[in-house]
Amino acid sequence: MAKIIAVANQKGGVGKTTTAVNLAACIGTLKKKVLLIDFDPQGNASSGAGVDKDSISASVYDVLINQTPVTEVMVETKSKNLWVCPANIDLAGAEVELVSMENRNELLKRGLSTVLDDFDYIIIDCPPSLGLLTLNAFAAADSLLIPIQCEYYALEGLSMMVQTVKSLKKSVNPNLCFEGVLLTMYDSRTNLSNQVMEEVKKFFPDSVCKTVIPRNVRLSEAPGYGEPIITYDKFSKGARSYLKLAKEIVKNNENKEPETL
C-alpha cells in the first residue's frame, strides 16, 4: 500500500514544488512506483515533471469535483516509475466549489483510495496556503514533509505551520505524522544558512532530515526543460542531494514510523 507524503509549507518560495517533483522522481529511480499529485493551481509540479498542463483533457480538479477516477487522469512521465496527476488553473475554482460539498475535506482521500495498491509512494505538492485544497491533502496524507528555506523568517513560518497543523489534526486527520523538516537553498558559505540550520535542529532535534538541499543553478534550470533534476543533470549537486533524500526517506519508512505531530 502506498505511503502518502504531503509536501507543504504555508510560506511560498521555500522549494516546495522543487522538492515534490525531484523527491518523487528520485524515489522512482529506486525501483519504487510513485504518483505525484500536483495540488497547486499553478501547475508547476506538472510542467516540472514534463507534463503539458495546457493540453491535458482531465486534471486533479476532476478527481475532486467530478469524481473522475485517478487512473483516468494520471499521466505516465518519461522519468522512471513516475506518474503525475496534473493540475491547471481549473483547480483554482475548486476552493469555491468545495465549500458546499459534503465531506469536502475527504475528497482527495476518497479519490486516492482506489490506487493505493498500485503505488509505493504518493507525493502531494500542496499550494502555499492552508485552504480547502491543503486540508484535503492533509486528510489524505500519512505524513507531512516541510521544506524551509535557510533564511531569517524560516523559523517564524515553520512554528506557525506546525501549530496550525496540530490544531487541525483533531478534525482533519488524527493519524497525520511528521516525515521531517527539509532545509533547502542551503549555502554553507554564509553564516545565515548555518545559523538557521542550528536553530531548526534546536526546534526539532529529532525531525530534521539529514539531507540538506544546497543552492544549485541546475536545480533552477531543470523545470524550464520539463525535467526533474535526476534526468536533467544527474551529476549535479542538486541531483545528488535529492537522490540522497529519496534514499533517506525510503530507508526511514522501511525501518521506523515517522514522528507524531
Image (cartoon, rainbow, N blue to C red):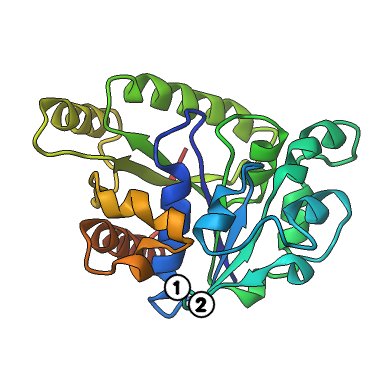
Asked whether residue 196 appears in the rendered view, the answer is yes
Disc 1 element: helix
Q: Quadrant of residue 245?
A: bottom left
The percent coordinates of residue 138 (x first, y second) are: 62, 43
The percent coordinates of residue 208 (x first, y second) are: 29, 42
**Residue at 59% across, 73% down:** 119
Residue assigned mark 1: 28
The residue closer to the viewer here, 14 or 34, is 14
Q: CA distance from mark 1 to mark 2?
A: 5 Å
Disc 2 element: loop
**Residue at 74% across, 37% down:** 92
Circle 1: residue type: Gly
**Residue at 38% across, 45% down:** 180
Residue assigned mark 2: 81
Q: Is residue 229 left or right of residue 116?
A: left
Circle 2: residue type: Asn
Q: Is residue 160 above or below residue 200?
A: above
Q: Quadrant of residue 241?
A: bottom left
The percent coordinates of residue 24 (x first, y second) are: 46, 63
Q: Quadrant of the N terminus?
A: bottom right
First in sequence: mark 1 vs mark 2: 1
**Residue at 73% across, 51% down:** 108
CB atoms at circles 1 and 2 under 8 Å apart?
A: yes
Q: What count of labels does the image hold?
A: 2
Q: Residues within 10 Å of mark 2 (few under 14, many from 20)?
A: many
Q: Is residue 199 above or below residue 66?
A: above
